[in-house]
Amino acid sequence: MDAALKSLGSTQPSALPADPTSAEVLSLVERCKHDDQAALRDLYGRFQRQVAAQLSYLVPRSDVEDALQEVFVEVFRSIRRFEGRSAFATWLYRVAVHVAMRHRRKAGKARAEVQVFDSPDPADEAAGPADSMLTRERLTRAEALLEKLAPKKRAVLVLHDMRGMDASRIAEMTGSNVLTVRTRLFYARREFELLAGADPALAEYFPPGKEARR
Amino acid sequence: MTRPVHLDEAEIERQALGAPAETAPEHLAGCALCKASVARARSRRALLGALPEVSLHEAAFRRVERNLFAPPPAPRWRWLIAPALGLAVAAAALAVFVRTPAVEPEAAPMALVPSVPEAAPPQASLASAAPQFVQGEVELQRADGSWGPLELERPLSEGAAIRTAEGRLAVMLEPGKGFVVEPNSSIELRRLRMGQTHLRLSSGAVYCSLGPLRAGESFAVEAGPRWVRVVGTAFAVTRWPTRVSVEVEHGTVSVADDERSPAGVLVRGPGELEIPDGADLGLLAARPLGPEQVGPLSGRPAWKLAAGQTPPLAVLSVTEPAGARVQVDELGWGPVPLSGKLPLGPHRVRSRIDGNEVDTTVVLKEGGGPLQVLLPRPAAVRRAAPVPDGSGRLATEITALIAGRTRDLRYCYEHWLKRNPTAAGTLEFRFRLSDDRAITSLDVVPAAGAAPPDETARRCFAQAVEGLSFPPGVPSELEVPFAFKPGQVADGPL
C-alpha cells in the first residue's frame, strides 16, 4: 500500500532526507554538545527549512513558525542524548513529530487563506474527471479540516497518508506501538471523511454511508 | 440469511489507490456501502496528496533565529565621555568622567564633539524625495493652495506641504535615508537639496531614519520653537590588553571585524559594549540592521523605508473594503486605501474587518502594471439578540463561546449563499444540551421572513458548532439567534 501511495506522486516532502549523516554533520553535532554557539547557529541554518517542511500539516499553518522554534529549543536542550545510533536527520524528525503532537494551538490565531491573485487554478491544469475536485478552495478546506483533528490523529494521518510512512516507522517516530498507530489512523481517516462530508465545498466527493458491518 | 462481508480497511485503501479492476472483489460491484467507502477514501487520498508544500517566509526563519540566539541586552549602567576625542578615533585609556543616568549632567564647558556645519553652500542642487508607501488619507497641497490626494508615483520636491489624516506616508530621500509622516500630521519640506534636508513639522509626528551622514550633510526637523538636528555620532573606543570596549554617547556605531564588513554589532547611544578578543561577533549581533530596516521608535510600528531597493519595483494598491485595516508584509497596520512600491514577488496582505481577519498572498509580476487588490468583504454573521437566559454573566460567556465559531458559521453561510443568493435573515439555533452542557442536538429554525437553510447548510452549521460545551448554569434548551446578511464580495484583481 505504501509503495502504491508513493506512486501517486505525492507533492509532500519526503519523509526523511536522503542524505545520511555526514561526518561534517556529526562533527557539528559534537560541537553543539559542548554548547558551541556558532555550531548551534550553524545547525539551525542547515536544518531550518527541512524541519519547517516536516512540520507543515503536522501543525496548523499559522503555528509552524512557533513550532519550528520549539523544535530547535528541544534539539538544543537534548542534543547530548543523540548517540548516533540513527541518522541525525531521523532523530531531528522524531523531535519535530513529538513537538507537533504536543503542540497546542495559540488562542487568537485566525487564519483564512484567500488567494486573490490570478494564477491558474490547479483544477484547470489537471487532467481527468477526479481532478476537478482539486480546486484551490477545496484544498484550502482540506487543510482546514486537517487542523480540526486532534494532534496525534493528525500526525498519524499526515505521516501515513501524505508522507508514505508505514505504521511501524510511525510507531517508532511517535514512541507508540503499531496497534495504536493503526487505530489512530483508522479514526483519523473516518473523522476526516466525516468532516469533509459535512463541508459544503467537499460534500459531493464524500458520499455519506454507515460504517459497514463486518 | 448470512450478512454480506464488506470490504475491510486494507482492501478499501487498496481500491482507493487504484488497484486493477480485475482484482476488485466481486462484492464491490454490488455493494453501495463499500463503493461509497472506496469513493471517500479515494477523495481523501487525492485531497491530501494534492496539498502543496507549506513554506515559511524568510522573515519567519530570521525571527526564529533571533529568538533562539538573542544575546542578553548590553548593560546601560553608565557612559563615558572622552573629551579629547573627535569622531572615529581609537585611543588608549583616557581621562574620563563617569556619571550615572540618575544624575543630571553638568553643563559641558565646551562642545565635546565638533558640530556639523549648519548649511551646505547655497548652490547645493535641488533634490527630490520619493514616496514609497501611502496608507489611508494623505494629501499634498497643490500650487493653487488646494489639497488633493498624494500620488505615489510623483516625487516630492522642495516646498511640498503634506498632511495626513488617519494615514501615513513613508518617503525615501536616498538609499539609507528617509522619514515617515505619522497620522494626523502636517509637514513641509522646507529645504530639500543634495545633502540638506529641513522639514518643518507644524503638527503631529515624523519618524526619521538616517544612515551615516556625510561631511557637510545636514538633516533637521523644525518643530515649533525647537530644532532637532542630526549632529553625527560621538563615541569612544578603548583598546584594553584583551578586549575592546566601545562607548557611545549618542547616535549609533557599528562594530565589525574589518573595515568593509557589512555585518556587525550595532551599539546605540548612550551605551557601551565590551568585546573580548577572539569572541565571535556573530554571537553578539542580534541582527545587523541594514539601511533598509528601521527600528521602532517609542513603540510605534516599524515601517521599512525602501532604501536600497533596486528595480524592478511594482505598485500594490489595496482599495477595498472601506473600513478595513490592512497590513502588508511586516509593515504596520493602517487603514485602506493603501498603496506602496514593493519588489516583485509574493507579499502577504492581511486585513481585518468586522472582526474577521483574512490572509491574502498577492504576487507582483514584472510588466503587470499596478496591482489593485480588492479584498473580499466577508458576509456578516452576528448574534441577533441577547441570549435569553436571565443572567448577564452567562450571556457574556455564551456570546464569547459562540463568537469563536463565527468564522465557521460564516463559511457555511457563504456557501449557502452561492447555492441560494437570497439566503438572508435571522436563524435561531436551538440547542439541546446534556447534563454536562455538551450539545446533544441542534435545530436551525428560520425566523419570520428568513430563508430556510438547505440540508447542506444545516449539516455545515451543525459541524460549525460541534464540540461546543456550554458553561454550567446554561439551561438544557437554549436558543441563540443569528443574523445572516450577504457581504460585498470582490471579483478579484483588476
Image: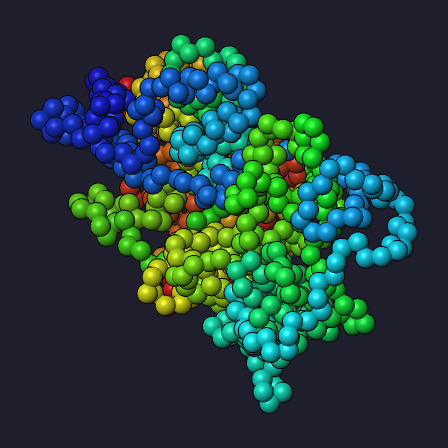
Identity of the residue drawn at 80% across and 42% down: B80
Relative to B69, residue B181 above or below: below
What is the quadrant of the C terminus of chain B in the image?
A: bottom left
Q: Between B290 and A193, which is closer to the camera in this rendering?
A: B290
Identity of the residue drawn at 47% across and 63% down: B341
In the figure, residue B243 lies in which quadrant?
top right
Identity of the residue drawn at 44% across and 54% down: B347
- In the image, taking residue B446 as reference, residue A184 lies left or right, namely left
Q: Residue furthest left?
A: B22
Q: Between A94 and B355, which is closer to the camera in this rendering?
A: A94
- In the image, taking residue B316 as reference, residue B95 lies left or right, namely right
Identity of the residue drawn at 52% across and 14% down: A80
Point out residue B32 in the picture as x, y percentages from the top left corner.
Answer: 22, 33
Relative to A137, residue A86 above or below: above
In the figure, residue A195 lies in which quadrant?
top left
What is the quadrant of the N terminus of chain B in the image?
A: top left
| Total labels drawn | 0
Point out residue A87 in the picture as x, y percentages from the top left corner.
Answer: 38, 16
Res. B351 visible in picture: no
Q: Between A64 and A48, which is closer to the camera in this rendering?
A: A48
Point out residue B272 in the picture as x, y percentages from the top left corner.
Answer: 73, 40
Relative to B239, residue B318 above or below: below
- In the image, taking residue B84 as reference, residue A45 lies left or right, namely left
Q: Between B279 and B35, which is closer to the camera in this rendering?
A: B279
Q: Residue furthest bottom?
A: B144
- Image colouring: rainbow
- In the image, taking residue B492 as reference, residue B46 lies left or right, namely left
Res. B27 visible in picture: yes
